[in-house]
Amino acid sequence: MASDDTSSLLDPSIFEYLKAHGEEELEVGDKLHQITAALNRHISTCQGFLSRIHSTPSSKLPPLLKHVEDDGIKPEIESIGELAQFASNYPYYKYNGKWTRAVQNVVATILLTGWLGGLGTESRPGELGRLLAIEEVGQILRVPVNLKDRDAFHITIEEYILALTDITEELSRLAMNSVTMGDINLTVRISGFIKDLFAGFQLLNLKNDIVRKRVDAVKYHVKKVEDVIYDLSLRNLIPKQEASS
């Protein structure tokens, strides 16, 4: 009798609701996996194109950067658009862990391409050494950034900062390879940029442990490039006005 009384108190709709919700989460997760898998393939392609900067003199970068934009970044933009359209139908912070690393990598490819002089527009041509702001990255990707007023897909400040730490590592490598290619001016330019970027990071009140550790690691990239500059200075290979800048 007690068992019958207990069963009568259980509303079957509760379990139907739980089952439906569980199935929906599985479907959403599977769809996000498909979208991010395609996005990661585009990212790998774009990163492969960008790896050629390490064997390309800066004077010959424009054709390479055009190739990166057309065949690397444009497919990324399309995949980000698909991700944004789908993900915005669901709570952002419930699922953003499934795509945040991929988004960070996309932002990094855009920042690196922009810094090298790509992604120019009619109103603002590309320029070597230019750092794109997060709002400019959002405009390129056609998605909002740092949303506070609604629950939808967006680029976060943390993703932007982590992407910046990624490009400092790539640029520190480029600084050394530029010496090999005889492009010492680029090495000096990179040194100044990374030092300025690290100094800017010190002004931030970073509460995210992952972001703080990654930002702290930038000092090693600074040191790596400073060592290259010091060696070049000892060999009198840096013009005085550049060495003092």
Image (cartoon, rainbow, N blue to C red):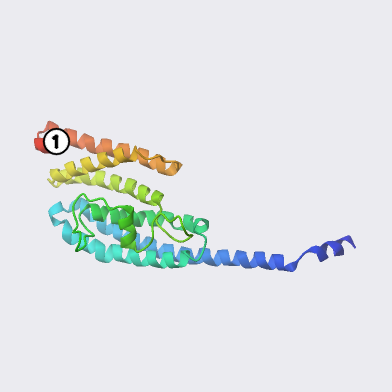
Q: Residue furthest top?
A: 234
Question: What percent of the width, then of the height, locates residue 51?
Answer: 25, 54
In this rendered view, identify the residue nearer to me: 136 or 9. 136
User: How many numbered callouts?
Assistant: 1
In this rendered view, identify the residue nearer to me: 113 or 201. 201
In the image, is 75 to the left or to the right of 19?
Answer: left
The quarter of the rendered structure image containing the C terminus is top left
Binning the other alpha carbons within 10 Å of mark 1 as few (below 14), some (14 to 19) or many (20 upward) gives some
- Rendered view: 119 above or below 239: below
Question: What percent of the width, then of the height, locates residue 91?
Answer: 52, 60
Q: Is residue 238 visible in this depiction of the protein? A: no
Q: Indicate the quadrant where residue 241 lies.
A: top left
- Rendered view: 243 above or below 111: above
Q: Residue at x 24, y 55 (%)?
A: 114
Question: What percent of the width, then of the height, locates residue 4?
Answer: 86, 65
Determine the secondary structure under disc 1: helix
Q: Residue furthest front?
A: 149
In the image, is 233 to the left or to the right of 104?
Answer: left
Q: Residue at x 22, y 47 (%)?
A: 174
